[in-house]
Each structure stands twice: as structure tokens, then as C-alpha cells.
Amino acid sequence: MEVNATPLYDKTDNPTGCCPRFKPEPWEDQALVFADKPFVRTSTVSLFHIPLNVGSMYRKTFAAIAQAHADTGGFLVLTQDDSPWHAEHLFAVDKDVPGADMVRLSGTFVTKVFEGPYAEAKTWCGEMARVVQHRGKHLDALYFFYTTCPRCAKAYGRNYVVGVARVS
């Protein structure tokens, strides 16, 4: 895969009108390489790791990205819970979004696709650590890409979540 590229995500396969249907195969066991890849950084307030304002945050962030014409054409939001009360979300973009908190990621990231309820996240963290160790790498940071909202996951009958680990 080329630098700063992510697997294709067909946003036109969207029968719910909300989240596109996720195809897990292109995301399974990938090595993504980012070099100063731009992301819009936002956050949510959580109650024991359950985000409380995620819907309004997504709407506001997607609107700012669209207004800046910074949409990557794909879809990738990396989420990291930094406490039971707060989570950080990184929205992949093509260029800086005026007024947004911008960050850039560089490094190699490995992926693994999980399927199941969000309550399994603790188990997925352990599995990602094992995946990284099996590759002979060190886990530097762990993110999750929640591919659909709970309503769309229910409509599609699947809840796919991609573990994305920055490794060294």
C-alpha cells in the first residue's frame, strides 16, 4: 500500500443514509504507512468509556471537513480512549481544515478487524497487543476505527471495529 493510503471504503454502498456498509476484507492484517498524514483532532466526553456527545461532534467535524473540501474520499476516524471520561478522535483529511485542531501522524500502523459489541474493546486491546508482539514489533499507540454507528451496525447485522496499532 502506498504512503498515506488506506483501504478503499465505498461510501456509495449506503442503504441506511448514515454509515456506509463496511467491507472488512481490505482492512484485515494491513500495514499502513503514514508520513505527516493530516488529521482533524476532536474529542468527546465519556461516562465510563461511553461517549456522550459523539453524534454532535461527528456532524460538526464532517461539516467543517466538507466546507474545507478536505475529504479524503475514504473514511477513517481513529479513536483513542485516554480515560473513562474522555476520548480523542482523529479524522483523516487531505489538507488542513481552517479553525480545526490539526495533527499529523507518521509511522507504520498494523490493522486487525474485530466484529462484536463495543463492550469487547478491552479484549480487542489484548488481541492487538498479541498481534503486534507476533510481528516482532513494539506497540506505541492503539486506536480503534469504529466503522459504523450503533444504529447502522444493527441495521447491517454486523458491528465491525478495526484495531489500528502504531508500531516500531
Image (cartoon, rainbow, N blue to C red):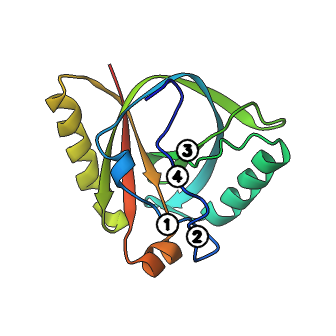
Residue 44 is left or right of residue 9, and the answer is right
Residue 152 spot, x, y in % from top left:
51, 74
Given the image, on which type of amino acid does mark 2 rest?
Asn
Residue located at (77% from left, 38% from top): 100
Is there a contact, CB below 8 Å, between mark 3 and mark 1? no
Closer to the chain start, of discs 4 and 3, is: 4
Camera-nearest label, 3 or 2: 2
- The one nearer the camera, 7 or 125, is 7
Given the image, on which type of amino acid does mark 4 rest?
Tyr
How far apart are the alpha carbons under marks 4 and 1?
A: 9 Å
How far apart are the alpha carbons under marks 4 and 3?
A: 22 Å
Residue located at (58% from left, 70% from top): 14
Find numbered disc 3 in the image and state the secondary structure of the residue it sits on.
Answer: strand
Camera-nearest label, 4 or 3: 4
Is there a contact, CB below 8 Å, between mark 2 and mark 1? yes
How far apart are the alpha carbons under marks 2 and 1?
A: 6 Å
Closer to the chain start, of discs 4 and 2, is: 4
How far apart are the alpha carbons under marks 3 and 1?
A: 24 Å
- The one nearer the camera, 22 or 55, is 22
| Marking on residue 88 | 3
Find numbered disc 1 in the image and state the secondary structure of the residue it sits on.
Answer: loop
Given the image, on which type of amino acid does mark 1 rest?
Arg
- Pointer 2 residue: 14
Mark 3 surroundings: few (<14), some (14-19) or many (≥20) residues within 10 A: some
Camera-nearest label, 3 or 1: 1
Given the image, on which type of amino acid does mark 3 rest?
Glu
